[in-house]
Image: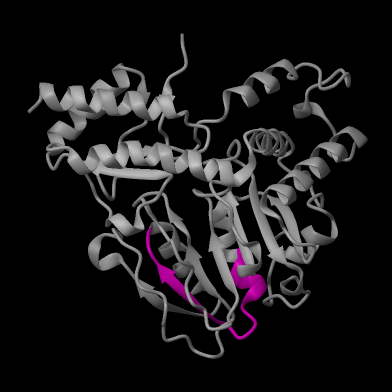
Amino acid sequence: MSRVYNFSAGPAVLPEEVLKEAALEMLDYKGSGMSVMEMSHRSKVYDTIIKEAEQDLRDLMNIPDNYKVLFLQGGASLQFAMIPMNLMKNKKAGYIVTGQWAKKAYQEASLYGEAIKLASSEDQTFSYIPDCSNLAIPEDLDYVYICENNTIYGTKYKTLPNTKGHTLVADVSSCFLSEPVDVTKYGVIYGGVQKNIGPAGVVIVIIRKDLITEDTLPGTPTMMKYQIHADNDSLYNTPPAYGIYICGKVFKWLKNMGGLSAMKERNEEKAKILYDFLDESKMFRGTVVKEDRSLMNVPFVTGNEELDAKFVQEAAAEGFVNLKGHRTVGGMRASIYNAMPKEGVEKLVAFMKKFEEENA
């Protein structure tokens, strides 16, 4: 069977070159006589894999030396608790709620201290990013938290919030490595890798070193302390070793593709093909205000649930899979991450045009 065009929001499409390379190394990684899956995380061979992965990520993102890179487990959802446990010194944090994941992070933080909703776009089903240029931010906030790209709703911050000097914490799970970022604008920038970087099971946390302290909330489990993982270079316990190995391959693929500036151009070009069609279509329409559209996740609807279901079914039969929208939005969603080739988007649009003609 030939490969499909996988528009899943995550776990998501990976670069074919990476998958082929991993397949070739499955039984014998570089003469070790075993798979990376079977290898001790304390071995010299694996030590090289994880160190190279970190260095390549540092190169791609220009991560300064005063930031620590941690390869952790538990997905982004575990970070919803880890962040307040480690950073809520005054037991007060601000959250900008622009979707389900930011909302869950906000709810989790309220278990550990006072979580303040600084702004929200829930009034219009999270279809826009609120104006964050002059929020009322209490002086004693420990940090301001955002989810930078909202996978379910297809919105993206084009300008970071004005935190008025407070530490910015950002979940970038679904826009990770899709464009250049200035890491110095964040105290913590983190994401689950299963959307744009690797297989599910790894979360990467990039954290400014001054935020890593022994001073965590009482009762914080050892495994939930950034300092423990930082002191042990992500090897305090057995890490998701194979997942990190695949991430490392994706970092090398990104370097070969020309880095994050080149990826941004590619991603803008792909997204434009789809958004331009949605803007002119009489049947399909996007659900997000234009200025806040994500390059990674594109939700769209016909306005008719039966027609939406028919579209998803017929698209799957043609090899365009995982286009069903999230249950909270309905309709369709095309996730067009770094590894989705341009031709995948072009062919999807051609299919949408044909579907529109046949069902007008």
Q: What is the residue that sits farthest to the left in this orientation?
A: 360
Q: Magenta residues?
A: 82-99
* Residue 198 is a magenta residue: no
Report whether 71 appears left or right of 319: right
Tell me, what colour scheme is on the image? one colour
From what the image shows, is residue 90 above or below residue 329? below
Front residue of 190/159: it is 159
For the point 47% across and 31% down, the residue is 340
Residue 222 seen: no
- Point out residue 33 in the picture as x, y percentages from the top left corner: 87, 17
Front residue of 261/7: it is 261
For the point 73% across and 54% down, the residue is 70
- Point out residue 109 in the picture as x, y percentages from the top left corner: 52, 71
The count of marks equals 0
Q: What is the residue that sits farthest to the right in this orientation?
A: 44
Q: What is the residue that sits farthest to the top in this orientation?
A: 1
From what the image shows, is residue 221 above or below residue 112? above
Front residue of 216/353: it is 353
- Quadrant of residue 85 in the image? bottom right
Report whether 58 appears left or right of 87: right
- Point out residue 314 in the picture as x, y percentages from the top left corner: 24, 21
Report whether 90 appears left or right of 290: right
